[in-house]
Amino acid sequence: MTPRTPKIPYGGDYNPEQWPQDVWDEDHRLFTRAGIDTLTVGVFTWSLTQPAEDTYDFTLLDRILDRAAAENRRVCLATGTAALPPWLAHQYPEVNRTDFEGRRHRYGQRHNFCPSSPAYRRLSTAIAAHLAERYAQHPALLAWHINNEYGGACYCELCAEAFRDWLRRKYVTLDALNDAWWTAFWSHRYTDWDQIEPPNALTEHWRGPDHTAFQGHTLDYFRFTTDALLGCFLAEKEAIRRYDTDTPVTTNFMGMFRPLDYHRWAPHLDFASWDSYPPLDAPPTWPALAHDLMRGLKGGAPFWLMEQTPSTTACRDVNPLRRPGELRLATFQAVAHGADAALYFQMRASRGACEKYHGAVIGHAGRDDTRVFREVAHLGAELAALGDATLGARTPARTAVLFDWDSWWALEISDGPSRLVKYQEVVHAYYRAAREAGADVDVIPQTADLTAYDVVLAPVLHMVKGDLATRLEAVADRGGTVLTTFLSGRVDEHDRAFLTDVPGPLAPLTGVRVDEWDARAPEFVQHIPELGAQARLVFEIVLPQGAEPVATYGDDFYAGTPAVTRHAFGEGEGWYVATALDQPGVDQVVRRVLDRHGLLGPYAGHPTVETATRVAPDGTRLLFLLNHAGKPAHLTAHATATDLLTGKETEAGDPLTLDPLGVAVLRLQERRQ
Amino acid sequence: MTPRTPKIPYGGDYNPEQWPQDVWDEDHRLFTRAGIDTLTVGVFTWSLTQPAEDTYDFTLLDRILDRAAAENRRVCLATGTAALPPWLAHQYPEVNRTDFEGRRHRYGQRHNFCPSSPAYRRLSTAIAAHLAERYAQHPALLAWHINNEYGGACYCELCAEAFRDWLRRKYVTLDALNDAWWTAFWSHRYTDWDQIEPPNALTEHWRGPDHTAFQGHTLDYFRFTTDALLGCFLAEKEAIRRYDTDTPVTTNFMGMFRPLDYHRWAPHLDFASWDSYPPLDAPPTWPALAHDLMRGLKGGAPFWLMEQTPSTTACRDVNPLRRPGELRLATFQAVAHGADAALYFQMRASRGACEKYHGAVIGHAGRDDTRVFREVAHLGAELAALGDATLGARTPARTAVLFDWDSWWALEISDGPSRLVKYQEVVHAYYRAAREAGADVDVIPQTADLTAYDVVLAPVLHMVKGDLATRLEAVADRGGTVLTTFLSGRVDEHDRAFLTDVPGPLAPLTGVRVDEWDARAPEFVQHIPELGAQARLVFEIVLPQGAEPVATYGDDFYAGTPAVTRHAFGEGEGWYVATALDQPGVDQVVRRVLDRHGLLGPYAGHPTVETATRVAPDGTRLLFLLNHAGKPAHLTAHATATDLLTGKETEAGDPLTLDPLGVAVLRLQERRQ
Amino acid sequence: MTPRTPKIPYGGDYNPEQWPQDVWDEDHRLFTRAGIDTLTVGVFTWSLTQPAEDTYDFTLLDRILDRAAAENRRVCLATGTAALPPWLAHQYPEVNRTDFEGRRHRYGQRHNFCPSSPAYRRLSTAIAAHLAERYAQHPALLAWHINNEYGGACYCELCAEAFRDWLRRKYVTLDALNDAWWTAFWSHRYTDWDQIEPPNALTEHWRGPDHTAFQGHTLDYFRFTTDALLGCFLAEKEAIRRYDTDTPVTTNFMGMFRPLDYHRWAPHLDFASWDSYPPLDAPPTWPALAHDLMRGLKGGAPFWLMEQTPSTTACRDVNPLRRPGELRLATFQAVAHGADAALYFQMRASRGACEKYHGAVIGHAGRDDTRVFREVAHLGAELAALGDATLGARTPARTAVLFDWDSWWALEISDGPSRLVKYQEVVHAYYRAAREAGADVDVIPQTADLTAYDVVLAPVLHMVKGDLATRLEAVADRGGTVLTTFLSGRVDEHDRAFLTDVPGPLAPLTGVRVDEWDARAPEFVQHIPELGAQARLVFEIVLPQGAEPVATYGDDFYAGTPAVTRHAFGEGEGWYVATALDQPGVDQVVRRVLDRHGLLGPYAGHPTVETATRVAPDGTRLLFLLNHAGKPAHLTAHATATDLLTGKETEAGDPLTLDPLGVAVLRLQERRQ
């Protein structure tokens, strides 16, 4: 239920409440010039719309929405509950979060409310209800945007109580909880629910949030926090639905954001949306992975790109500038991966405070002759020309990557074997290999239906829950390939080790047994001769139980033992990669797997050219070609197609050149069978 | 109103209260031997002179001052209020500071009183008054030394209240405050003064004191802290003045000390004094910059070097030894830059506690045959021989460097573009370039009268306040040169961006416009071909608006655009340096600027030889030559002069050799016109 | 009074309370197979044996001990008081420790009780008494194991009170305390005991536990903490002795563990025991030093190796695997240094919580065909074959290394000259040099009787107390050699500098005087030409007062002055090493010293071969040969001997080959005279 629009909504965060009204005229003049039709409004207006507990004042917001409507722009209306008004924090100190160190904060910043606070719940739903009542029928209203970038945990007494309630509902008995958390270890057997504390720096943790004495306890607090914040979202959504039964509701996610398990949230959003700020120097597959993860939240339905910077960030130690063409390339990459909107943070640069140097469509001088404004306006024109061609299109992936917050958490809060293995990095390495080989990839939760996939990649699947192992076996059984890696199949849903050979429930499928594993400092390199690759960090020693070696370790006392194995299972195969291969190593393994299923893309030999397919609701097949290099890419067209951006037609076999950072959106003439 | 003395006062911190009285005899024997005539006394005696709230006991202090007088030594008498007695902290817990993390401390260390504490105010002024009453007429008294190395902030409820009062006085209305702090951002509109919290780790900050959500708020707390501590100083000074109307009063500053804006303090001191502990491996221009900054506090009047170590520090991770000759060189450097006193911390090494390994004139064994004692005594003899030749002399600088705490703070608490740009480092690079080119330099506040200067260097002048831009334009108008750099002219006094082209009010003078800027990791290097130099960290993209390029970027998409520009303005020029040039790059730019005004020094070609000029009250011109190299410097005398240290005369054109680490104090025969 | 056993006890920590009883059968089957005869039980059972304050339940523990007895295994029974039950922490919040930051913790982790808590004292002694009453006569009982790895400080109000009492007892008067702590510095003169606070982040410290304003104050808190935890141990021991007058009592130490001065504890243990987890990449002499330190606790009596991992640790960032043979080598190294037991943590891997990946004899899959199990079982058989041959044997060392917690603390909390000098590293360098030269070494407290030693090495003996200097002089007087180093002889027992030439009381013996010292960053290297060695960090400038130079500094202004000296004293010598030599430098110095006394070992030329001698109670001389290299070591036998592990005899002069990581335990035929 993504909002219906005639074209890709284009625009973003707009805060006219920071400016005198004469600036508004200039804003709209520039919006028109840049093709901006959609404005995210109200994210930080709570202190204006409710200047005191018993006073609401929508004068300004009325004018903002009325003006938008008058200008034929649509509004994504935020409830604004992520940034408390000072009076609220002052009047209800309990609404301020208690941090991991056990310190109750006082008023400041944003994203800092206690999710268990009754005052917050009452007042946030009240403002949401007021907004819905007032604007449900407003012609500018396109979507609801609840809160903003939910995240962060609270450790106050209210949360402690709420956590205990959550545990009571989950475990029913203390015996069940003691068993799940394995409290016989270190004499932790609880005899009363009230003895249970939030796990933080004053209780079970040391050296920060990832070092805990009881992983099961900490995992449950992560899950509780996810649910507690989700509760806030749901309460606001319910308040909105009292007055507006059909406008789509979302909240803006943050891609691979560890604190919240978005898979638990996904069913409750009408459509997914997210803010893309990839790390410095990240390869293009990093944001791509996040896009695909977000698309996977709603079973492949298009999502909104709710925020990206038109030029620079501000909050990092070093904030590089998006170079000419990079914004356009990143935007089309988002569309290629399923975005049905392209929005910025922000329309006009704040004059003061910590985001004043954050990039904006309109800078402090208000010019329309800056490079950035020109690029934004050019892109606006291109998106207008594209019309509805991509809207509602879906990705026909036959390759899946499993992405699982529980495994992420369990891996990174584990003591041993190595604190240096990072979930995202390993997952990204496999995702990247598949994407650079030209495969369309769905990034899916471990509960997803796997029947559509020929290849399922499940790197560092540390935790295996429910019937997942059986469903993975079914993929192989019917001829598919499943790949998993070191540190997979280790623990159950409570982070208890499986009392069987490693990799636990994945052992039958992979045909291996692992009794021991070495971990080493990052300077230590193992050579994998068959791949000409290097491996680092963790080296599991594999005893094949039916699997055949694909590659072996070159060094140390386990030299010659398998580093990568393949196991015939049913009609298909189960692969196991026992160590952290470097990217060339992962690439080779993944390409062998994809090749078995004919999933290498037509341009797999061009490392800088990304391809992505979307199939429009009418069956039209669109192929996005994205050149991430600063040099032209010279391809040979693999099919007959029309570039929707230029109108140019290409026959199969024709030369096809992409400009530096260039993009083509090819409408394929013939369907691939 | 520097104290009147017949020669440079020589001596320093003396703590006989730590020792039995038989040690005192030995102390004075050694003082005589070393030419020590001035003792800083009472810095840490509060717990002795007031052993309980209602008990004062000056027996010991009487003996210390009487003995000094008997030995013909003078005393710089401290009020000692920087180190609380235990009973005070125990009896009035509110006097202990609450730190940035919101934690009320308990008794310990020093420099740890809450500046808003009524108990502290009452008791610190009482002890100051008692001291003044008792010693105002004492023959040994030479100067008052209030407190010690003021610094550090408190975040307690008393300070919160005091801060709100300070804000009320500054802004009068909450509307004005909301506008100044730009509180529409992140829904921070305050509706009651009581909602305002001190900005710290529990409110607006994260990742420490430099990361704040609201720069305007944090800046005001920096200013409030400056004023709150100044209030403590003023209260003590007033107490002293009740009994002693004319002895000069100072407090010892710490050079480039970020927490306090010394320019706000300067008018209230009778004379400036400071403690010089340059960082490890700092070039000689680093302490020189601090000396000149301190001299600039009182409009160029001489200051006191209140502390330096005769040999080593103790508090650093690594405390290197001053090598033979380094102490003498550093001392004459201080004198060359305006010091009219040369004092040490400390006379005799403490037997216990954290400074027992800090260097001292007299070590634990009490010897007079150590290398350090011999160097101290030799220097004492030289200063005695120098007599009053340098006292009261002033520096005839035609070059100024603007130094502005507000810009320092604003730059370093800013989110974006780069956390890696450090105010002191950039200012030092320009200062160093001018000094090494032989120019005498005044380091002045942005409010200073600029009419005396041919060249004004204003690096990273992030904040531009009041009529500064106009006054800078006036410098150029009358033929002078003004130079400013990247990240200048960005914000007003409230840290709000100027709503005009960058560099804001400096744009007319510099003739440039900057729409965008790149920031990169320190590994990234831009080449500046015209200068053969490198640039790093921040790269502003300059659109000349009348300025001509002096040097350009060599790389990236902005290759060929200007990195350094010069703009004809009135009779003079406005220069703009758009990036962080390395030292050779800065040197070339600054030398070009200085050369235009004939300000390159006669020994500018000798990189290790520092020169500095002072003009005595009778018009005698003194040229200090300081050889910072471990090898002799072979110069050709540029003028006829007599070296006051050796009595040797040199004719212009004669060879003039400086020993390794050698010093000459030349009385020039002819005035330079 | 080490427990009497017929062979080396073999086994370790066993937690059957974590498992259903059917697992117990499997456990014992595997124990038998691995030769495991000794089980450490009860370390974490408090929450089971006392599920509520008024309820004790020993059902499970009965079964564990009865089963052990039935299987002919012995039990080391823990009182389990290191891990609180949740109800206790919940009911008595004061029992939770207040950390260095002044934060009272809440329930979590282990090793976290306040040692001054009356509730803890009452309840911990009660459980100990109950256990002793119940199991004193149990046939399985072999030893008592009180608490577990004591350590860590508390800073609560109860501890503050207890600290003040401890100070009153030590100093009697505040004058004495003020003098000891040198409180005249920084105005700290205390006038009431209640003004004294625990030294922590809220009082005298900054930048953590090693940065204090008052070293004397902090040192006393370290000593108080040692005594406070010792008080907990003694109270439990007394409770046990009420019911069991003769079973030996221990607690497991942690080798070179800075927080506790084990020399203060040693008299109160019946035998010493410790847990060996050497740092990553530590050379073999690192654990050897710890073994010898532990052996030195009880005057050379054998100790127990209470814990080591059979394979990996879990709590480190990187947890490498013990390679094949390493476990056996480390175990025989322990025996070679005096261990009369070889125990593991742990028998069976925990299923959950933070040690689930810690190595274990039995892994999660319960297999007996893993490499690790096989190695454990093989070693079990070897130890069985060895029988009682090594039990009760003692080390006939003629070389001693002084190890002094007070010097360790004083050195590392000192401000100046260098924070980079680490006590353990310097001590280890000298220990290593002696051990690699083949000398048996006792590591002894500074109060130990020195008459047995020809060579006494006293590196970084920062603090010199009592009559130590006289006793060291006596060693030299009778012909022995004493060596000390830079930063020795600096302070008295209160950390007050000696008011004489450095090295204070050691000056007569060493014949040197040190007036000044340089400290430099680690990149700075001094060359010591006579040794072909390098020196770093600290460079004392030595003025010989009778000593002759052995080696000199090669660089800087003190080039040519002595870096190493030798002083004829009585019949012997006093050596002084004025700088931190690298290992080759230390090796040369120490070998020269040892050679003078004929103490170089027969295999001193084989750097990877460690030798260690033990003399059995019947006078049999055992020589352990340990090859730490991955290659065979080819030696020539220096004596006729029988290898107790293989039964093979070797004549003097025969070739003697050690396998890679190989071990020989030679029973020498002829006694060395």
Image (cartoon, coloured by chain):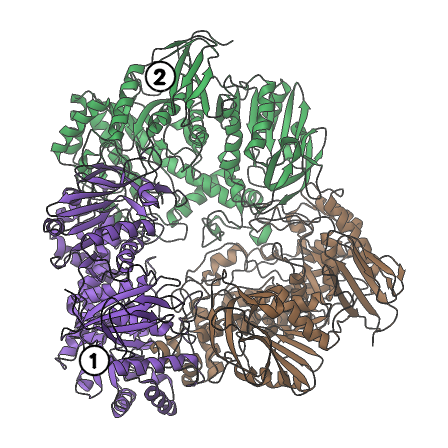
Chain colours: A green, B purple, C brown
C491 lies left or right of B288 = right
C441 lies left or right of B312 = right
Quarter of the image for the N terminus of chain A: give it.
top left
Quadrant assignment, res A115: top left
Callout 1: SS: loop
| Residue pointed to by mark 2 | A391
Relative image position of residue B492 (x, y in whole percent): 17, 47
C82 lies left or right of C305 = left
Residue type highlighted by circle 2:
Leu
Quadrant assignment, res B163: bottom left
Relative image position of residue C398 (x, y in whole percent): 72, 76
In the drawing, what numbered circle is on residue A558? none
Do dots 2 and 1 share one subunit? no
- Subunit of mark 1? B
Q: How far is mark 2 from mark 1, CA to CA?
A: 87 Å
Task: Please state which of residues C246 and B308 is positioned toward the viewer in this rendering.
Answer: B308
Task: Please state which of residues A462 and B494 is positioned toward the viewer in this rendering.
Answer: B494
> With respect to residue A616, does B399 lie above or below?
below
Relative image position of residue B318 (x, y in whole percent): 45, 66
| Residue pointed to by mark 1 | B388
